[in-house]
Each structure stands twice: as C-alpha cells, then as structure tokens.
Image (tube, grey):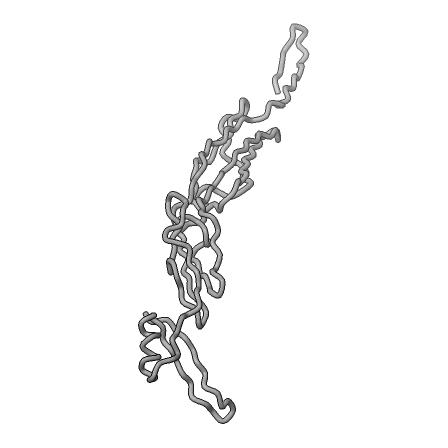
C-alpha cells in the first residue's frame, strides 16, 4: 500500500497486488543403478528454496513424493515441490528419480527338480541353486550367479534318472553305487501299518 499526497492536499491510497508467483528450481537427479544383490538405491538431493520478488527467499516448501535420502525401488518416481508466497501465489517444480536394476534373464527349475534363488531371482548378484527329486541326479551346474555382464554363470542344469544296477550280489554293492553318486539312501523298515519298505534319497554334503 502506498500513500500519495497530491498538490490539493487530499490523500490517495494506491494498492499494488502481488500477482507474481514465486520461482522454485528443482534439482537434476541422474538415473541410478542398483548395486549387486540390491533392489533399491538410496538417493539424496538438496531441498530447493523458493524465491519471490516481494517476499525474498521462501524455505517453507511442500514435498509430494519420497523425501531425499529414501531408498527408491526400481522404476520411475515423480517428485514435486510446491511453494507459496504471502499473497498465496504458487510456484511448482517437478523432476523424476529413475532407478534401474540390472537383470539377467529368468531361469526355470529343471524338469523333475527344484530351484531356489536369492534376492529377486534374476537381478545382478542373485544366486539360484538347483536340486532334483528322488530317483534323479543333477547334471550341470548346481548353482548359477547373475554376473555383471548380465549372463548366468555355469551351465543349464538338468535332472536325469539315476542309473542304478540292481543286479548286484550284496546290499553293500548296491549302496556303493549311491555313495559314488553322492546320494544317501535311507531305508525305513516295515511297520504294523505299512508292511512295505520305504526308500528315501538324499544328497551327500
């Protein structure tokens, strides 16, 4: 509000309305890549300030999105800052935080077998271990790792039916075959409820 005194002595009040919005500049954040065995990236930046011709520097900014210093998951994340001056004029800036997780192609469990993977199963640094059901033996790599070149280490595993010679003279000779194949044969004796022998295969460490 300005007060003007003209020559005739009468006071005139002149009102100036603040209609110019404040300015706010968002930071520039480059694409981030997750570390091995990680699915998130910690991203930090300086909180921006608003600047207004009438009110000067404005530090009371409103954030929409994850705050700086957060662990951002894979994907494209929108961040927005809003600032108001005393006349309720609004300034806005927007930017994106992009996080990429390096991945190998997905693996599958072998037929007649199982697969157990760490982390997300196909991200850089993940390890997948393979095993077979009873009566089958693993051929190929028992474990594979997603490497920095985004290729899996080792060779594709398969589960092949065990070739056991049953035409042997002694039980010891039969069991020796399982030992050579690093398999443990567990034989459960018959019970009153179940008169049959039960066989169970395990893996020797």
Looking at the picture, how far across and down is residue 154, in whole percent? 36, 53
| Residue drawn at x 49%, y 90% as measured from the top left | 195
Q: Is residue 10 left or right of residue 28?
A: right
The image shows residue 25, relative to residue 189, as above or below, that is above
The image shows residue 113, relative to residue 42, as above or below, that is below
Residue placed most toward the observer, 143 or 177 = 177
Looking at the picture, how far across and down is residue 22, in whole percent? 56, 26
| Residue drawn at x 37%, y 58% as measured from the top left | 141
Q: In this view, does 202 lie to the left or right of 62?
A: left
The image shows residue 42, relative to residue 86, as above or below, that is below
Looking at the picture, how far across and down is residue 105, in whole percent? 47, 48
- Which part of the image, by quadrant, shows the N terminus? top right
Check the image and name the residue furthest to the bottom.
192
| Residue drawn at x 32%, y 80% as measured from the top left | 173
| Residue drawn at x 60%, y 30% as measured from the top left | 90
Looking at the picture, how far across and down is residue 85, in whole percent? 57, 30
- Which part of the image, by quadrant, shows the C terminus? bottom left
Residue placed most toward the observer, 74 or 143 = 143
Residue placed most toward the observer, 181 or 63 = 181
Q: How many labels does the image show?
A: 0
Check the image and name the residue furthest to the top.
7
Residue placed most toward the observer, 93 or 150 = 150
């Amino acid at each position: 509000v300005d007060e003007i005194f003209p020559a005739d002595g009468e006071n005139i009040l002149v009102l100036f309305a603040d209609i110019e919005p404040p300015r706010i500049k968002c930071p520039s954040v480059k694409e981030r890549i997750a570390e091995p065995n990680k699915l998130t990236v910690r991203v930090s930046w300086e909180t921006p300030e608003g600047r207004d011709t009438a009110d000067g520097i404005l530090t009371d900014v409103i954030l929409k999105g994850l705050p700086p210093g957060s662990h951002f998951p894979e994907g494209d994340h929108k961040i927005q800052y809003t600032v108001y001056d005393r006349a309720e004029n609004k300034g806005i800036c927007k930017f994106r935080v992009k996080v990429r997780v390096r991945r190998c192609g997905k693996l599958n469990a072998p037929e007649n077998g199982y697969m157990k993977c760490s982390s997300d199963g196909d991200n850089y640094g993940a390890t997948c271990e393979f095993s077979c059901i009873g009566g089958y033996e693993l051929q190929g790599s028992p474990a594979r790792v997603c490497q920095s070149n985004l290729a899996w280490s080792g060779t594709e595993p398969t589960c092949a039916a065990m070739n056991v010679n049953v035409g042997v003279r002694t039980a010891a000779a039969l069991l020796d075959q399982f030992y050579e194949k690093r398999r443990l044969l567990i034989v459960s004796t018959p019970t009153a409820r179940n008169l049959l022998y039960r066989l169970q295969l395990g893996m020797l460490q």
